[in-house]
Image: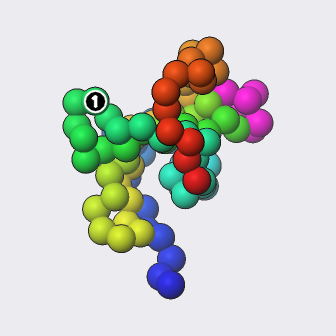
Amino acid sequence: MPAPAFTYTRHARENLIDRGIASELVERTILAPEATEPDPRYPERVRAYRAWPEHGGRVLRLVYVEELALTYRVITLFLDRGWRRRRESPIRSGG
């Protein structure tokens, strides 16, 4: 089975640098999210969520598109301070 490939928009790359987030965390969030949901404005996009102890347990939220099998384009990402309070919302479990 081929290894997954990841590409990043300029915006996503800037967010990695500005927020001090390692690309490894982004890639692990895509491959093993705690939860996912479709983006309400762009149904082809997926929102993925995962808490990271490396960032005080805050939740990494990212938006990506699976362009081909195992090829992901990351559009945006940030540490979502409020998602922990919303965890009871109807978001599909990932994994």
Residue 56 is a magenta residue: yes
Q: Is residue 52 above or below residue 86?
A: below
Question: In the rendering, at what x and y percent does residue 91 appear?
Answer: 49, 32
The stretch in magenta equals 53-58
Residue 94 is a magenta residue: no
> Quick one: SS at disc 1?
loop
Nearer-the-camera pick, 19 or 6: 6
Q: In which quarter of the view is residue 11 placed?
A: top left
Q: Is residue 10 visible?
A: no
The residue at 73%/29% (across/down) is 57
The number of callouts visible is 1
The residue at 43%/62% (across/down) is 6
Q: Is residue 60 visible?
A: yes
At label 1, counting other C-alpha atoms closer than 10 Å, the crowd grade (few under 14, some 14-19, many 20 or more) is: few
Nearer-the-camera pick, 38 or 7: 38
Nearer-the-camera pick, 3 or 54: 3
Nearer-the-camera pick, 75 or 22: 75
Q: Which residue is mark 1?
A: 40
Outermost residue on the front side: it is 90
> Is 26 situated left or right of 84 in this image?
left
The residue at 36%/71% (across/down) is 69
